[in-house]
Image (cartoon, rainbow, N blue to C red):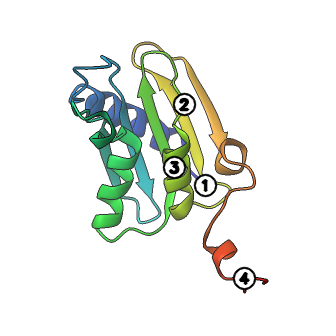
Amino acid sequence: MTKNRDIEKLIALARAARKRAYAPYSRYAVGAAVLAKSGKVYTGCNIENAAYPSGLCAERVAIFKAVSEGERELVAMVVVTSNLGSPCGACRQVFSEFADDEAIIVLASARGKRRKTYRMREILPDRFGARDLQRKPSV
């Protein structure tokens, strides 16, 4: 179970990561922090590109950093925006690859104490995953 002090630490780290966002086009800075089962934390910020599809969301930057360091089990993710913006579908799907149904997702405001908390099962119900690929296809 993720403790409240863990969430507070993740929020602080995601807020700091948000300050490093490269968002010259949308001007919508996002910071993220993920907590691995190992206890290690990985952060990310959104990185835009003039060729728009080439940019990457803060959530996936943080998740990919964790995975590139050998993590395979994530237990929490915090996303900090100016208006409690929620992760896009691609970020939800990527997080679900490494998180179980009970993993926590917290949306927090850049300033103040506004926040929303979800479980993976709530933010991406009926998710598609590895278990779906293990079935033998019917012809």
Q: Are the residues tagged 2 and 1 within 8 Å (C-beta)?
A: no
Residue that mark 3 sits on: 76
Residue type beneath disc 4: Arg
Q: Is residue 31 above or below residue 93?
A: above
Q: Residue at x 42, y 23 (%)?
A: 81
Which secondary structure, mark 2?
Answer: loop
Chain-order first, disc 3 or disc 2: 3
- Image depth: mark 3 or mark 1 in front: 3
Q: Residue at x 30, y 28 (%)?
A: 18
3D distance between C-alphas at marks 3 and 2: 14 Å
Which secondary structure, mark 1?
Answer: loop
Residue type beneath disc 2: Ser
Which secondary structure, mark 3?
Answer: strand
Closer to the camera, 135 or 131?
135
Residue 40 shown left or right of residue 134 in the figure: left
Chain-order first, disc 4 or disc 3: 3
Closer to the camera, 132 or 103?
132
Residue that mark 4 sits on: 135
Residue 86: numbered disc? 2
Q: Residues within 10 Å of mark 1 (few under 14, many from 20)?
A: few
The quadrant in which residue 135 appears is bottom right
Give residue 104's position: percent from left, percent from top. Answer: 59, 46
Closer to the camera, 28 or 63?
28
3D distance between C-alphas at marks 4 and 1: 31 Å
3D distance between C-alphas at marks 2 and 4: 31 Å
Residue type beneath disc 3: Ala
